Image: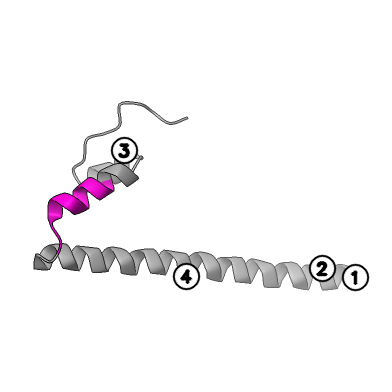
Amino acid sequence: KALKQKAEARVKSAEAKQKRADDTRRKILVGAAILAMVESGEWPKDKMLEMMGQQLTRDDDRALFNLPVNKIKNG
């Protein structure tokens, strides 16, 4: 019984790891597509920065886009 539980836990762990990897890859691909559209002029850079300003909360993430840091700290 213990061996069966251990095997099931290993399968669940592998599935969770793959799910996280797939999610990360999707995010990278979406980001690359948006950046390509901005660089080619298909999408205005100011609109992309506005969107990022609304979504990003961590100061180090905001710094990547030269966005002002949050005045209110989370946590």
**Above or below 44: residue 59:** above
- Type of amino acid at the residue the image marks with label 2: Gln
- Type of amino acid at the residue the image marks with label 3: Asp
Q: Where does label 4 land, which residue?
A: 22
- Type of amino acid at the residue the image marks with label 4: Asp
Q: Which mark is on residue 1?
A: 1
Please report the residue visible at 22 percent of the width from the left and 35 percent of the height from the top: 68
Badge 1 density bin: few <14, some 14–19, many ≥20, Cα 10 Å: few
Q: Where does label 3 land, which residue?
A: 59
In the image, is residue 44 part of the stretch drawn in magenta? yes
Give the quarter of the figure containing the N terminus: bottom right
* Gap between marks 2 and 3 measured at Cα: 42 Å
| Residue 29 pos. (x, y %) | 32, 69
In the image, is residue 20 part of the stretch drawn in magenta? no
Left or right: residue 32 versus residue 12 is: left
Q: Where does label 2 land, which residue?
A: 5
- Residue 60, by quadrant, is top left
Disc 2 + disc 3, Cβ < 8 Å: no
Q: Secondary structure at mark 1?
A: loop
Q: Secondary structure at mark 2?
A: helix
Disc 1 + disc 4, Cβ < 8 Å: no
Looking at the magenta stretch, what is its main secondary structure? helix
Left or right: residue 37 versus residue 54 is: left
